[in-house]
Image (cartoon, rainbow, N blue to C red):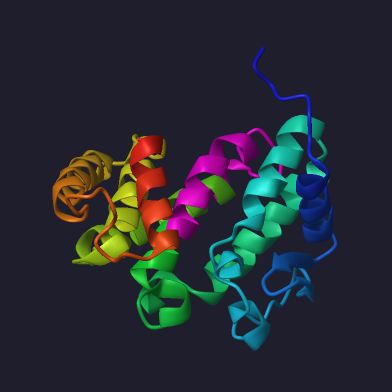
Amino acid sequence: DTTRVDLSERVRAVADAAVDGVILVHCLGDHRLPVGRADIDWFDKRFHMDASVVRFAFLDDLAEAYQVLRDERYAEAARDYLTQYMTAFPPDTLGRHRQFDSVLQLGIRNSVWCRTLHVFAESAAFDDAFLEWLVSFMGGQLQYLHNHLSTTINWRVSNARDLLVGGLYLSFLSSAAAWRRYGVRVLNDAWHRQFLPDGTHCERIPSYHANVTETFLYL
């Protein structure tokens, strides 16, 4: 049994806040965004305070809390946020809202959704009909990423990683093999193109160097 038995105070705080309809953000200080779990206004300027919000970083904490505590409140909250997002941004609007659908934000967000899916799938809140909707939605987003992959800089590495992650977690989809192949090809190419002879990333920005290096170490 490899189930985790520990839960950090930070994860518990973020997850409990999300259950209460509050997203915790750390950007130039700690902030509480009381957005609710219904009728969310995704265009509220507060959502652009930190990219972690539109990337659904808090979903990782909800998933970890659910996995450890088996409290259905965490899965129910996750379903509410996902429902709100998918309803607000149906597939036919994909690409119209850059703050949400830039390939960087889209890719990272879908990686979070993919890696938490198997945890939430054990909850009654994620019934068959909802899972079918969610997987179909992610499949469309990942296909869009495949078709609009960034052509350069750290975004290209991030996009390729996220496409590969999606192809692994959603391996049962017909397009998944193509996502994996393309992701691997782009990552292999970026490994040779984006690192300078001294080992630094070509953009010469410490945070980008750290992120790109972390991607290859993770792989």
Q: Is residue 122 above or below residue 76?
A: above
Which residue extends farthest front? 198
The residue positioned farthest toward the top in the image shown = 1
Q: Is residue 59 magenta?
A: no
Q: Quadrant of residue 71?
A: top right
Please indicate, yes or no, whether residue 169 appears anywhere in the rendered image: yes
Q: Residue at x 31, y 61 (%)?
A: 154
In the rendered image of this protein, does residue 204 appear above or below residue 186? below
Residue found at x 69% / y 47%: 61
Viewer-nearest residue: 50 or 136? 50
In the picture provided, is 208 more to the left or to the right than 12?
left
Provide residue 80's location: percent of width, then percent of height: 70, 60
Query: For the magenta stretch, what is the residue range?
Result: 108-129
Looking at this view, is 189 or 74 the one in front? Answer: 189
Q: Is residue 109 magenta?
A: yes
Rendering coords of residue 134 (x, y %): 51, 53
Residue 216 % position (x, y): 33, 41
- Mostly what secondary structure, the magenta segment? helix
